[in-house]
Amino acid sequence: MKTRNQWRGVKFVLGMIALCTFVVSAQSAVLIDEIFDTGYSRTVNNIANSNMAWYKSRSNTIATVNTDNPGSLSFSASTNNGADAYWGYFTDPTASFSIGGTSSSVSSGHLLLGVGDTLSASVTFYLTTMPSDTSTANLRFGLFDTYIGRSMNDFNGGASSSMFTNNPGFATFMTLQSTSTNNGLSILRHTGFTGTGLFGTSNDYTSMGSGGGLSTAQSSGEKLTLMLSVTRNDASTWTIESDLFDTLTSTLLEGMSVSTNDGVSSFSMIGMRLPRMPDGTFGPVVFSDLNVQVNAIPEPSTLMLAASGLAMAIFAIRRRRS
């Protein structure tokens, strides 16, 4: 049986370990984690109340909200009118606040990415039928900021809007298909500010690098997580990374990163483009999570505090064993 003093020692050690965990984990903040649960409203953007709208670009695409736990949002279309696009805003348009534990902040709806911080966006989804035609299997996903304003409604015939003109940001283009490919991933910056299409033309983008290695074939119904992150290393360098995972096994299917001195530090929206199937049908595509968060690299003083606390905990354990 442990004595009272021994129990106090155990509590002290557990408390120090918990403190170390808190010090490091407190360096991240989730802006939105939309899982389409009960009460979800697809076309109402209200980040303060944890509801992120996910707009669609074509009138014949049918959206269905399924509020089974953990929830899902599906889109399907029966005719071939070209690729479909989806987009949403992870801040409220008038929001202004500091992001705790990071050097980033939100000002009038724009996330200002601080030095040492990483902005990451991910979507978790699956296709009921995975494309096999490489000419049409082009998945595009991006992090952008709004320059003119926000398009906060569904479109009727494609992802084109004057509101998308001049929107700075980064995107990843990759193959999405039932056969393996090699180096089918590209990371690009949105630099052409004349077109109104969010992903409509590659002329609006400047390639920053391509690769990704051998991409594992994706299967129909396989749940995938696509991630895109922007790290502001210092005042003049950024790192952009893109990864595609099997959600259930956390297996990396393809991924790569690039560095640049020509970066973007303000963001407010994510966008995604999916191709139509060669026979004209598509889907449904089923989303189960949209997540956007800011992660900070702990400062040296923070790491020293965590290391000191952990050392104290280890010392206490060894002392009470001796």
Image (cartoon, helix red, strand yellow):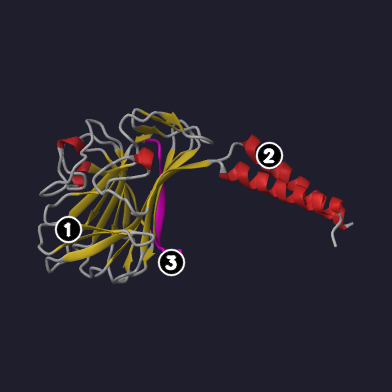
- Residues at marks 2 and 1, CA–CA distance in whole angstroms: 53 Å
Relative to 85, say whether 168 is above or below: above
Secondary structure mostly seen in magenta is: strand
Number of residues whose C-alpha sits closer than 10 Å to that of mark 1, classed few (under 14), some (14–19) or many (20 or more): few
Q: Where residue 52 appears, x then y in whole percent?
A: 32, 45
Quadrant of the image occupied by residue 79: bottom left
Relative to 83, say whether 299 is above or below: above
Mark 3 is on which residue type? Leu
Labels 3 and 2: the sequence-earlier one: 3
Q: Is residue 106 left or right of residue 299?
A: left
Q: Is residue 313 in the magenta section? A: no
Nearer the camera: disc 2 or disc 1: 1
Q: Secondary structure at mark 1?
A: strand
Q: Residue at x 13, y 49 (%)?
A: 158
Q: Residue at x 40, y 57 (%)?
A: 255
Residue at which label 2 appears: 304
Nearer the camera: disc 3 or disc 1: 1
Point out the stretch of residues depicted in magenta. Answer: 245-263
Quarter in which the C terminus is drawn: bottom right
Q: Nearer the viewer, residue 15 or 301?
A: 15
Residue at which label 3 appears: 248
